[in-house]
Image (cartoon, rainbow, N blue to C red):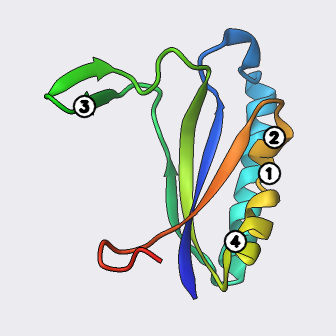
Amino acid sequence: MDEYLILMRLDLLTKEAQPSPEQLQVYMKMYQDWVGGIAAQNKFVGGTGLSTEGKVIKSGQIITDGPFAETKESIAGFITIKAKNFEEATNIAKACPILNGPGNSVEVRKIVGVDNTR
């Protein structure tokens, strides 16, 4: 089995897009159930949420506040899973509760080593 990264993107900045505390509890339960289902299949490797603060370092040692402060869509977190192929990884990602929010998205990327780019 290969490892895949599931990046979860959502609007972390717009006040109107933020869930109420009650909604957040429901969403967290849905997320925990989703991850629990992946773990029950022995396909969960790890993952975490990310803060809204950050720094972006560009070539020439240019450091800016970020990430991507001009966009609403930010990476909120990620998980790493094991899957047989992209199709299986995508099917797992399609069930991510983040996708219940308008404008939210997930991205699936295969993890490859620097000496193995295929």
Residue 106, placed above or below residue 15:
below
Task: Categorize mark 4 by other alpha carbons within 10 Å: few (<14), some (14-19), many (20+).
Answer: many
Q: Nearer the viewer, mark 2 or mark 3?
A: 3
* Residue visible at 78% across and 30% down in the picture: 103
Mark found first going from the N terminus, 3 or 1? 1
Q: Which residue is mark 4?
A: 89
Q: How far is disc 3 from disc 4 in space, using C-alphas? A: 30 Å
Of the two numbered discs 2 and 4 on the same chain, state the one appearing first in sequence: 2
Q: Amino acid at mark 3?
A: Ile
Q: Residue furthest top?
A: 15
- Element class at badge 1: helix
Residue 46 in picture, x, y percent from top left: 50, 66
**Is 22 left or right of 7, judged from the image as shown?**
right
Query: What separation in Å lies between label 2 and label 3 (alpha carbons)?
Result: 36 Å
Query: Can you identify the residue that label 2 sits on?
Result: 26
Numbered mark located on residue 57 in the image = 3
Q: Quadrant of residue 2?
A: bottom right
Q: Cα distance, mark 2 to mark 4?
A: 25 Å
Disc 1 and disc 2 in contact, CB within 8 angstroms? yes
Identity of the amino acid at label 2? Val
Measure how far apart labels 1 and 2 are at the Cα level: 6 Å
